[in-house]
Image (cartoon, rainbow, N blue to C red):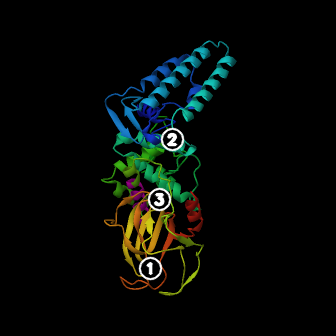
């Protein structure tokens, strides 16, 4: 039964497009691979179902870019222009279908299936606002995140854990880097239980007996640690077994910094209601004069000999300082080294450090959520002393980036990123 429910929800959420720029919506509950494997005799029903998906209905549940109409349809609000485009697309598909159904031989059917799939692929990209590979990838991820909303676990909880795992895998040698759109991997000792004698035995009953959290979510009789459905369903149930998301994360990761990072990612996904938080901007307003070069690794003497962990961007007093990305204000206030400073945490386990400000944006406070380009404060020359110290060096923004791998956090050179953001 669980497998049937999941398949219906997955069919409803698996789409090649979600909300596009300009407010247009276009959702198609099928993929090319699914089209090419479906029998030609069933395509008429498929197109009818797809056509009906554009009719809003009751009992809709809201997710980023989609609305689920119980049990399997997608209610999709469309602007008139998008609706007109979808109508034209439907007519073209209908005409193509009629040609396809006239084919009698297997080879003819195969050729027409390929042609129809190619036609759909082309129109999906050009009948609405442009959607790049990243958006398609994010939509595929959302399929799995959203499928377990009915268990009481918001999609952004699972998305945050998956993103955290994706962030740390390239930075660690003790964990495997997972290929594909999904990154979440549950360690064997947690999946099977620490005393499980035979990890080739995927029986959910044995796993439960030995204290593992792995479950058979898709109903195939196996609790497979490599099956995305089993993985995300098991993680959702694990979260539900605790009083709060915070408590579940503390029990699972046993590191407060990791828990804080995941909670931040979840907050950002919830706030902006999208997975697409990849926009970056230059930290200084480009209408003002500024100059900078790579100052990473330079010697610093105040407060003891140390290495310069960042890039200095020189600009006049009062030059606006901007958030380089979507993030949460993790630190705000005085630091004897950095003066008036802001610390911003993003969805990529990166901490963005802005130092030597003259002042902050009015009303900005710790815990605030900001988007790329939001005003944080103004360039100054504060720091190198007790609170209020200023003028010991020319006005500039010290910008630093620190990345966390789930065990440690360290600084890395922000100069290449600054050059890229400046030119974009």
Instruction: Identify the secondary structure beneath mark 2.
Output: helix
Pointer 2 residue = 140
- At which x and y percent is residue 50? 47, 25
Along the line of sight, the residue nearer the viewer: 34 or 294: 294
Pointer 3 residue = 325
Q: Residues within 10 Å of mark 3 (few under 14, many from 20)?
A: many
Q: Which residues are magenta?
A: 255-267
Q: Farthest residue to the right: give it.
A: 107
- At which x and y percent is residue 86? 48, 27
- Earlier along the polypeptide chain: callout 2 or callout 1? 2
Separation of residues labelled 2 and 1 (CA atoms): 47 Å
Is residue 5 in the magenta section? no
- Earlier along the polypeptide chain: callout 2 or callout 3? 2
Along the line of sight, the residue nearer the viewer: 417 or 179: 417
Is residue 87 visible in the rendered image? The answer is: yes
Separation of residues labelled 2 and 3 (CA atoms): 23 Å
Instruction: Identify the secondary structure beneath mark 1.
Output: loop
Is residue 260 in the magenta section? yes
Instruction: Identify the secondary structure beneath mark 3.
Output: loop
What is the magenta segment's predominant secondary structure? helix
Pointer 1 residue = 381
- Earlier along the polypeptide chain: callout 1 or callout 3? 3
């Amino acid at each position: 039964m669980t497998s049937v429910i999941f398949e219906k929800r997955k069919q409803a959420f698996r789409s090649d497009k979600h909300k596009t720029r300009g407010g247009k919506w276009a959702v198609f509950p099928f993929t090319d691979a699914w089209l090419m494997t479906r029998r030609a005799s069933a395509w008429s029903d498929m197109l009818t179902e797809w056509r009906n998906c554009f009719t809003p209905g009751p009992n809709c549940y809201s997710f980023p870019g989609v609305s689920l109409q119980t049990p399997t349809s997608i209610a999709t609000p469309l602007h008139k222009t998008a609706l007109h485009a979808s109508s034209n697309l439907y007519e073209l598909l209908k005409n193509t279908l009629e040609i396809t159904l006239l084919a009698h031989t297997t080879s003819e059917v195969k050729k027409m299936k390929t042609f129809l799939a190619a036609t759909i692929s082309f129109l999906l990209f050009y009948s609405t606002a442009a959607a790049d590979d990243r958006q398609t990838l994010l939509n595929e991820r959302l399929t799995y995140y959203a499928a377990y909303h009915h268990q009481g676990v918001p999609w952004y909880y699972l998305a945050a854990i998956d993103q955290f795992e994706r962030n740390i895998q390239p930075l660690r040698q003790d964990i495997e880097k997972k290929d594909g759109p999904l990154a979440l991997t549950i360690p064997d000792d947690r999946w099977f239980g620490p005393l499980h004698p035979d990890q080739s035995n995927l029986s959910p009953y044995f796993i439960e007996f030995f204290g593992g959290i792995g479950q058979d979510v898709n109903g195939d009789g196996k609790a497979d640690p490599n099956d995305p459905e089993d993985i995300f369903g098991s993680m959702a149930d694990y979260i539900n077994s605790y009083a709060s998301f915070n408590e579940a994360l503390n029990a699972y990761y046993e590191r407060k910094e990791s828990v804080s990072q995941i909670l931040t990612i979840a907050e950002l996904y919830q706030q902006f209601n999208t997975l697409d938080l990849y926009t970056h901007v230059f930290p200084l307003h480009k209408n003002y004069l500024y100059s900078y070069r790579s100052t990473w690794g330079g010697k610093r003497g105040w407060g003891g000999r140390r290495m310069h962990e960042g890039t200095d961007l020189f600009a006049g007093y009062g030059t606006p300082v901007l958030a380089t990305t979507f993030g949460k204000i993790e630190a705000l206030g005085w630091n004897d080294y950095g003066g008036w400073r802001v610390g911003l945490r993003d969805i990529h386990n990166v901490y963005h450090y802005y130092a030597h400000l003259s002042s902050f944006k009015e009303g900005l406070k710790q815990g605030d959520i900001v988007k790329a380009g939001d005003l944080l404060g103004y360039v100054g020359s504060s720091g190198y002393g007790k609170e209020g110290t200023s003028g010991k060096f020319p006005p500039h923004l010290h910008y630093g980036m620190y990345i966390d791998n789930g065990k440690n956090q360290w600084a890395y050179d922000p100069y290449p990123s600054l050059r890229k953001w400046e030119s974009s």
